[in-house]
Image: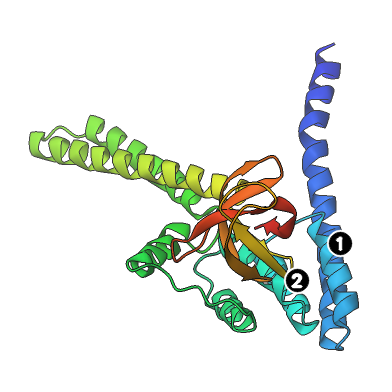
């Protein structure tokens, strides 16, 4: 009976990992084929292969490549969407940011950021790190460091050294807690993004969430908005310049 239980337990642990490894292998094969198609100038085939790989596995690099395909095919709104998705996962990637800015230059709307947001952007890049799991790794290292310092403080006999190690342990714990909070925040941002890209060729942003309400301003495809809330098929959106209004949910796609 114990042997059967152990076998069942192992199967529940090994099978998910095996399935994940198989999906990653399939995705890598599709990505390799997509890269060959892209190099040969067949962006449509490359895009189809990248999209198929994206259903099995995703990464900043894969989303970036999908964005490049859309850009080459002159589908600027989708190029911006996937560059933004890639940047959300890897805010420190200069190549993603450069291509995103290049794509934005092809859009009709020019939205100037409010004063002070540039400093916020620098903070976002530092806080976001180079990948989604960066802060999770840092939290593990700092917790391990805190445990090591605590064990060391219990082992030493000198009063000054013991107190110094206890202070360092406290600092490590504070840093570890901060890293855990940032790791949780980054995971939530990726899973529940509040940004969106306008996909409709043009759309009126209105004062109320209903047809016939006053049009406040006009937006075109490719413009980034922040979704503040949704109500009965309408989304309240905000621009980087502070303008706020309502538009149909169907006109945008979440990052």
27 or 142: which is nearer to us?
Answer: 27
Residue 223 seen in the figure: no
In the image, residue 235 above or below residue 198? above
Residue at the left extreme, as displayed = 160
State the image coordinates of residue 214 (x, y, percent, origin top left): 59, 56
The answer to which of marks 1 and 2 sits earlier in the sequence is 1
In the image, residue 160 above or below residue 87? above
- Which circle marks residue 52 in the picture? 1
Image quadrant in which you'd find residue 197: bottom right
Judge left or right: residue 198 versus residue 157. right
- Quadrant housing the N terminus: top right
- Give the labeled residue for mark 2: 66
219 or 55: which is nearer to us?
Answer: 219
Residue 140 seen in the figure: yes
- Quadrant housing the C terminus: bottom right
> Helix or strand or loop: what does disc 1 sit on?
helix
In the image, residue 32 above or below residue 225? below
Image point 24% across, 32% down: which residue?
155
State the image coordinates of residue 184 (x, y, percent, origin top left): 50, 42
23 or 153: which is nearer to us?
Answer: 23
31 or 164: which is nearer to us?
Answer: 31
State the image coordinates of residue 200 (x, y, percent, origin top left): 74, 66
């Amino acid at each position: 009976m114990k042997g059967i239980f152990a076998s069942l337990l192992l199967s529940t642990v090994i099978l998910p990992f095996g399935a994940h490894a198989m999906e990653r292998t399939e995705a890598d094969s599709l990505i390799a084929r997509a890269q060959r198609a892209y190099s040969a100038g067949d962006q449509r085939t490359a895009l189809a292969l990248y999209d198929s790989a994206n259903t099995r596995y995703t990464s900043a690099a894969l989303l970036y490549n999908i964005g490049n395909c859309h850009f080459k095919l002159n589908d600027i709104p989708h190029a911006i969407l996937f560059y933004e998705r890639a940047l959300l996962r890897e805010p420190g990637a200069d190549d993603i940011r450069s291509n995103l800015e290049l794509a934005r230059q092809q859009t009709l709307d020019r939205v100037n950021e409010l004063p002070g947001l540039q400093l916020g952007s620098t903070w976002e890049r530092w806080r976001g790190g180079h990948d989604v799991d960066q802060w999770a790794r840092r939290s593990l290292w700092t917790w391990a460091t805190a445990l090591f310092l605590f064990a060391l403080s219990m082992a030493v006999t000198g009063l000054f050294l013991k107190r110094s190690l206890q202070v360092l342990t406290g600092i490590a714990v504070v840093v570890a807690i901060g890293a855990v909070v940032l790791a949780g925040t980054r995971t939530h941002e990726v899973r529940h993004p509040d940004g969106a890209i306008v996909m409709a060729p043009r759309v009126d942003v209105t004062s109320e969430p209903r047809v016939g309400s006053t049009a406040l301003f006009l937006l075109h495809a490719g413009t980034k908005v922040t979704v503040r809330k949704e109500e009965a098929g309408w989304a309240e959106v905000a621009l980087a310049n502070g303008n706020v209004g309502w538009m149909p949910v169907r006109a945008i796609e979440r990052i």
